Image (cartoon, rainbow, N blue to C red):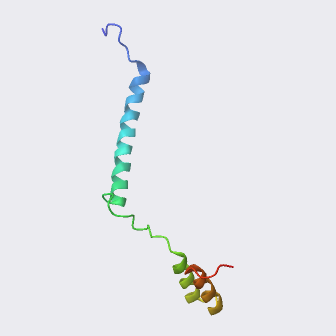
């Protein structure tokens, strides 16, 4: 006899689900830790943002803009006259 304490069928079915959820959280945390390292290193896919000058240089090197546009925008970026 349980002296009035009866957890019922609901708790008996819920306990395995809680253990499964706990195991899932542990696996998820282990995978995240393995992917991101110890937190002191940036993610391998993370890259620093390009500055405006780097974007301008890349576009000029790729032939997207001509020399006149490149020189005009470079002067503006360097603090020259603004239109």
Residue shown at 34%/45% (left/top)? 26
- Does 80 sit above or below residue 33? below
- Does 34 sit above or below residue 81? above
Question: Which quadrant of the figure has residue 70?
Answer: bottom right
Residue shown at 65%/91% (left/top)? 68
Q: Residue furthest right?
A: 83
Q: What is the x, y in percent for residue 59?
A: 58, 84
User: 50 left or right of 75?
Assistant: left
Q: What is the x, y in percent for residue 41?
A: 33, 63
- Does 62 sit above or below residue 79? below
Quadrant the C terminus occupies: bottom right
**Foreground residue, 63 or 36?**
63
Question: Which quadrant of the figure has residue 71?
Answer: bottom right
Residue shown at 36%/54% (left/top)? 31
Quadrant the N terminus occupies: top left
User: 10 left or right of 64?
Assistant: left
Residue shown at 39%/34% (left/top)? 18
């Amino acid at each position: 006899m349980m002296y009035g304490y009866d957890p019922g069928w609901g708790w008996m079915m819920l306990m395995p689900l809680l253990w499964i959820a706990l195991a899932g959280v542990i696996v998820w945390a282990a995978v995240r830790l393995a992917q991101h390292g110890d937190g002191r290193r940036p993610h391998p896919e993370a890259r620093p943002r390009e500055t405006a000058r780097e974007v301008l240089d890349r576009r000029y090197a790729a032939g997207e803009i001509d020399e006149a546009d490149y020189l005009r925008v470079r002067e503006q970026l360097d603090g020259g006259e603004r239109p």
